[in-house]
Amino acid sequence: MKSLFAQGNLLSAPVEQLRILDEVINKKTLSSFDSVLDKSGLFPLRTTGLEILQVNLGKVCNQTCKHCHVDAGPDRKESMSLEVINHCLEALKLGKFPTLDITGGAPEMNPHFRFLVEEASKLEVKVMVRCNLTILLAGEKFRDLPEFFAKNKVEVISSLPYFQKRRTDSQRGEGVFDKSLEAIKRLNQLGYGKENTGLILNLVYNPAGSFLPGDQKDLEIQFKKELLKFGLYFNSLYTITNMPISRFLDYLLETENLDDYLDKLVSAFNPQAANGVMCRNTLSVDWEGRLFDCDFNQMLDMQLEGEVRTVQDFSKTLLENREIKTAPHCFGCTAGAGSSCGGATAI
C-alpha cells in the first residue's frame, strides 16, 4: 500500500485513512469497534459529562515528530484566531468545565496563547498545556515560558519518548533529547516536578514502534530512576498508544505492519479501558472552532453531528450526554491498559 503523505494529498487524507483502516478490518475479518462495544454492553458509547475542554490551537510546531497524529510542523499555517479563542473561553464558562487542556502543534506558537492561559486562569479552572519542551529553548520569544507557566499555575504535560538520547532523537529529531533535558531542568528550578510546590510536570511516553506501551507504573519508576541520574524530576508518567492515523499510519504502511498492528489492537480490546476513554468526559475544539469527541476524531475530520457543531454554538445541555462517533482507530484507545491524553485508562 502506498504512503499517504508522500503523495502530498493531505486534504483527502482523513477520508483515505478511514477507508484503509476499514479495509484492513474487513479483510482480516476482525470485529468492528461498534460490535465489540456492543458485546461489552457499552454501545452506543456516550459521554458521562463535560469535564475537560480540549482546545487545539493549531498545527504550527517547531518540531516534526514521526508519530505525530496532528501532522504538525514548522511549515503548517493553521492557527486559532482570537475570535475563536474568545468563543472557547465563553464555552469554558457556560459549560463549567473544571479543566482546560491546551494542545497543538506547539500551542505556545499561537500568538494568542498567553491571552488564553491568563483569561482561563482568572476563571479558576485547571489549565493544562501540552508542551514539547524544546519550544522553551526556541528563542527569546519563548524563553520566559517556564516563569509564565509557574505564575499562572499551569500544569505542564510534555512528551519524552524515552530516557535515552538515541531513541528520543530518532523519533523527534536530532538534538531533541538534550534540549528536552535542559527544558526539564529549567522547569525544575522553578519547582516543577517537585513535591509540595503545586507545580505539576507530567511526562508522556509512547512506543517507538508498532507495539503497545508497557505498564505505566513500571515505566514511571524506570523514567524517574534514569532522569534522576541527570538530577531531573517530574510528577507522573502517562503512557499513550500510537494511534494508527496520520504519520504513524504512514509508517505502518511503509513498513507493512498495518495488518499486524490492527490485529494486535483488536485482540487486546479491554472493556475496562473502553469504559474510561477520554472522549466520555472531553469536548475537543479544532483551530477553526469545530467540535469533536476527541483530538483523534478531530484529525480524522469526524466532526460532531446535530445542532451543535461549533464552539460558538456551545450548549451544555445538548453536549453533555451525546453519542460518541467511533471508527477502527478507537481500538488504539481501548487496547491493553487503555490510552488517553491522561495516560492509561484501566489501571
Image (cartoon, grey):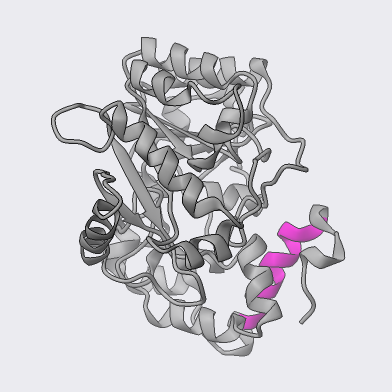
Residue 277, position in %: x, y? 36, 54
- Where, quadrant-wise, is the C terminus in this rendering? bottom left
| Residue at figure coordinates x 61%, y 43% from the top left | 305
Q: Is residue 131 above or below residue 172?
A: above
- Residue ranking furthest to the bottom: 28
Quadrant assignment, res 110: top right
Q: Is residue 142 above or below residue 343?
A: above
Q: Is residue 182 at all visible to an observer of this figure?
A: yes
- Residue ranking furthest to the front: 230
Task: Inspect the magenta stretch and tell me whether residue 14 lies in it.
Answer: yes
Is 339 on the left or on the right of 71, as rendered? left
Q: Is residue 144 above or below residue 265?
A: above
Residue 85, position in %: x, y? 59, 20
Start-end of magenta stretch: 12-24
- Residue ranking furthest to the left: 196
Residue 143, position in %: x, y? 52, 25
Residue closest to the eye, 155 or 222:
222
Q: Is residue 213 above or below residue 121?
A: below
| Residue at figure coordinates x 69%, y 70% from the top left | 250
| Residue at figure coordinates x 63%, y 50% from the top left | 70
Q: Determine the main secondary structure of the stretch shown in magenta.
A: helix
